[in-house]
């Protein structure tokens, strides 16, 4: 190849990177990623959102195809461990809730540390010092109700108000054995109110469903009048589409849980994985995430009307250590009281 052609190729490559934004870091080798040709994303977000992100990535001209596998946090975590132990390498990037899972993966030596470019400017909640995982988005777990069936004057002001007689047979809950965020909410509630809270809540005969986001379908259809806790991002999305849903914040505050992303050490497409993680933390995608009802760490995004400011959530956090340590007992306690 002539020196002119070499220079032209270099300039063209730099132009592509520049046109795609500032997310392609020096560590994400674009040519190596292109040779790999594919990135497989294990993700526990909504199918519509996952498809939107993958479609946007695929249109960028990287020559890398994004493919996602969507499931709950627990099933995805167990699937990856089973595959890794069988030396089956499929996943390139994880994005799912429950920091405890990521702590276990780190301790087991399953993660490839990587810090996307620009994240040094992020809110520290959304980063880790060693880059074992990073948090591209966070959501609060909020109560939400059917506005056609529940009057504002009826709304609980405290989490303990869900134990009042008038809420019997009207509630829906996610199962922590399938939903990572449900386990983290339980950690907060048990610390604040003790196991007695869930023993009494079980007597309210709530409907139990696997997915935290899936609880909203029952509220929208009127089969349940209120979900005790569901992802704010999902509530926001459904309300934007005209569903009769509205959230509120009890006086004690709500859990805000980060939804981490990480690259497995045995990723079959490691350069494509880094490129995709850079993409997740770019301003363009961070704004897309915010417009979908989540909170992010990027300092330059603008929040849409209807999404409460972060401080108005009265945020409560669960540490990765507590999430790892307490999640098994949350699942066991839930089975004990709710029978599922």
Image: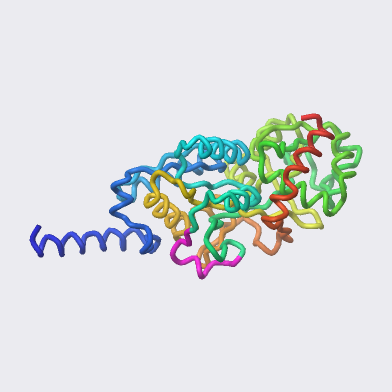
Q: Decide whether the magenta segment is chiefly helix, strand or loop.
A: loop
Foreground pick, 268 / 330: 268
Q: Which picture quadrant has residue 132?
A: bottom right
Which residue corresponds to the image point at 14% horizontal and 61% vertical from the top-left? Answer: 6
- Position in image of residue 197 (x %, y %): 87, 44
Q: Which picture quadrant has residue 22?
A: bottom left
Quadrant that contains the C terminus: top right
Which residue corresponds to the image point at 58% horizontal and 49% vertical from the top-left? Answer: 108
* Residue 121 belongs to the span the image colors magenta: yes
Which residue corresponds to the image point at 47% horizontal and 42% vertical from the top-left? Answer: 91
In screen coordinates, is 261 left or right of 101? left
In screen coordinates, is 151 left or right of 324? right
Asked if residue 192 is positioned above or below residue 154 in the image, the reply reads: below
Question: Which residues are the magenta region?
Answer: 114-124
In screen coordinates, is 216 left or right of 326? left
Which residue corresponds to the image point at 72% horizontal and 36% vertical from the top-left? Answer: 175
Quadrant that contains the N terminus: bottom left
- Position in image of residue 216 (x %, y %): 67, 37
Residue that sits furthest to the bottom in the current view: 121
* Residue 256 belongs to the span the image colors magenta: no
- Position in image of residue 50 (x %, y %): 49, 43
């Amino acid at each position: 190849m002539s020196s002119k052609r070499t220079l032209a190729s270099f300039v063209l490559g730099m132009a592509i990177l520049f046109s795609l934004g500032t997310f392609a870091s020096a560590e994400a080798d674009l040519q190596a990623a292109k040779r790999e040709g594919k990135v497989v994303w294990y993700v526990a977000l909504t199918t519509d959102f996952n498809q939107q992100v993958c479609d946007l990535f695929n249109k960028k001209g990287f020559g890398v195809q994004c493919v996602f596998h969507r499931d709950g946090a627990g099933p995805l975590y167990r699937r990856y461990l089973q595959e890794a132990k069988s030396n089956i390498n499929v996943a390139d990037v994880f994005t799912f809730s429950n920091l405890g899972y990521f702590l276990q993966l780190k301790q087991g030596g399953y993660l490839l540390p990587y810090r996307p470019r620009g994240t040094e400017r992020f809110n520290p909640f959304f980063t880790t010092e060693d880059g074992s995982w990073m948090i591209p988005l966070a959501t609060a777990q909020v109560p939400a109700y059917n506005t056609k069936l529940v009057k504002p004057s009826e709304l609980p002001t405290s989490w303990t108000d869900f134990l009042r007689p008038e809420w019997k047979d009207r509630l829906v809950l996610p199962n922590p054995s399938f939903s990572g965020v449900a386990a983290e909410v339980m950690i907060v509630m048990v610390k604040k109110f003790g196991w007695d809270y869930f023993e009494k809540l079980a007597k309210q005969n709530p409907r139990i469903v696997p997915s935290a986001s899936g609880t909203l379908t029952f509220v929208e259809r009127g089969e349940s009048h209120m979900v005790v806790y569901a992802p704010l991002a999902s509530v926001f999305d459904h309300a934007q589409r005209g569903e009769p849903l509205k959230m509120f914040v009890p006086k004690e505050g709500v859990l805000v849980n980060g939804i981490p992303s990480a690259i497995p050490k045995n990723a079959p497409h490691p350069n494509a994985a880094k490129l995709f993680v850079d993409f997740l933390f770019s301003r363009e995608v961070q704004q897309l995430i915010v417009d979908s009802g989540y909170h992010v760490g990027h300092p330059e995004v603008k929040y849409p009307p209807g999404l409460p400011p972060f401080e108005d959530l009265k945020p409560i956090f669960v540490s990765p250590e507590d999430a790892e340590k307490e999640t098994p007992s949350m699942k066991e306690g839930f089975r004990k009281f709710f029978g599922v």
